[in-house]
Image: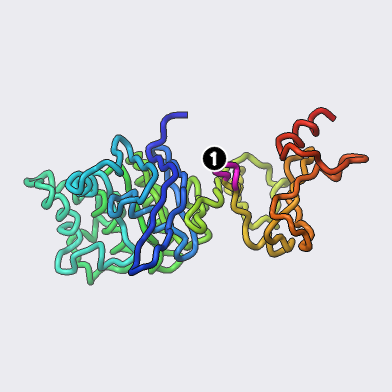
């Protein structure tokens, strides 16, 4: 595999408010390939916006490593970060008021970042017009911001974010203030630009259906990656379609499927979804069973006083005995010798 375009290793961000410390990111590991269109989801306060601000050069991590392309963001001066934000990153915010200048028309808004970067002449107007055509607003480029719908304003914002030809586009809730039909148009616009420009894009969202519009979705919980959802396409015959599967869509002879994977960190730790823990009443400690298909996690009796994790060999094995000392690795080696 090629070297990732975005690489974060052990990323930590601690905010200090008065005498309190709030840990927004705690050892997050994260990578994105060049040209990938991906989404980040998570509850409010999970750390997803903090991660986006760090990748965009708007904030600095407390510890860890973060690299975007050839830029080591942890080692850059404030002046270098300012240049990085202006030349390498495009931003699309949820509120149109943060993206656009209301007393300029659409094409003038797209020209503004180029003007601030020192561009002049006919090439500036030509690029602005080309970008507006790419987002489907070629006929609306002379309209003032107030004359555009919410979805049109957001598409102008996307064109503005691309004005200085960035290598990374970061969008924070780009569909948060529009209806579902308009959201679909915005997603389609981003997908078209991703394909045409080979641009790396990261969309931060609360929308659980974002997996249908991007290549990959990662979920952040408590400042760490908890799961990853991948979209896959496979050929199917009409008689094979299971219409009860709400996570599958058919298009001709193709079916889209979505596979959610739990993310393990380097120490082998994983975040088990809260609803699973509640369903099986797993609290404090658990029992790991080595089975033929993998590792089974079961609730441990709650009257145990020992704080350590209880490890047993699979109950599926005939005549099995509790695992001897040596940890899960030793139990796995003994299981393989059976």
Q: Is residue 77 left or right of residue 245?
A: left
**Residue that label 1 marks:** 266
Residue at image position (76%, 37%) is: 331
Q: Secondary structure at mark 1?
A: loop
Residue 117 appears at what percent x and percent y?
13, 48
The stretch in magenta equals 264-269
Q: Which residue occupies the extreme left position in the image?
A: 121
On whether residue 181 falls in the magenta region, the answer is: no
Residue 262 appears at what percent x and percent y?
60, 48
Q: Which residue occupies the extreme right position in the image?
A: 319
85 or 289, which lies in front?
289
Residue at image position (58%, 44%) is: 264
Judged by its main secondary structure, the magenta piece is loop
Residue at image position (73%, 55%) is: 306
Residue at image position (44%, 60%) is: 205
Q: Is residue 108 left or right of residue 67?
A: left
């Amino acid at each position: 595999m090629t070297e990732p375009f975005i690489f974060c290793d052990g990323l930590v961000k601690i905010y200090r408010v008065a005498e309190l410390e709030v840990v927004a990111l705690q050892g997050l590991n994260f990578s994105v390939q060049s040209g990938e269109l991906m989404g980040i989801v998570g509850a409010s306060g999970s750390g997803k916006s903090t991660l986006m601000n760090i990748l965009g050069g708007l904030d600095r991590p407390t510890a860890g490593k973060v690299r975007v392309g050839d830029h080591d963001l942890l080692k850059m001066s404030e002046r270098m970060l300012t240049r990085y934000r202006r030349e390498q990153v495009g931003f699309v915010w949820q509120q149109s008021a943060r993206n656009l200048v209301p007393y300029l028309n659409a094409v003038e808004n797209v020209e503004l970042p180029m003007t601030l970067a020192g561009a002049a002449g006919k090439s500036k107007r030509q690029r602005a017009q080309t970008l507006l055509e790419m987002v489907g607003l070629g006929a609306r480029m002379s309209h003032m911001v107030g004359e555009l719908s919410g979805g049109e304003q957001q598409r102008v914002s996307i064109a503005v974010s691309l004005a200085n030809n960035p290598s990374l586009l970061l969008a924070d809730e780009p569909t948060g203030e529009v209806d579902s039909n308009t959201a679909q148009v915005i997603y389609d616009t981003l997908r078209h630009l991703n394909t045409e420009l080979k641009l790396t894009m990261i969309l931060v969202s609360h929308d659980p259906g974002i997996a249908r519009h991007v290549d990959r979705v990662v979920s952040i919980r408590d400042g760490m990656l908890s799961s990853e959802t991948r979209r896959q396409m496979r050929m199917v015959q009409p008689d094979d379609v299971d219409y009860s599967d709400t996570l599958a869509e058919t298009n001709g002879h193709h079916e889209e499927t979505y596979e959610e994977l739990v993310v393990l960190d380097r120490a082998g730790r994983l975040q088990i979804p809260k609803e699973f823990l509640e369903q099986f009443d797993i609290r404090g400690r658990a029992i790991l069973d080595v089975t033929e298909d993998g590792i089974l996690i079961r609730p441990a009796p709650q009257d145990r006083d020992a704080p350590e994790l209880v490890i047993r060999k699979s109950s599926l094995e005939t005549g099995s005995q509790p695992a001897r000392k040596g940890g899960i690795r030793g139990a796995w080696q003994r299981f393989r010798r059976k």
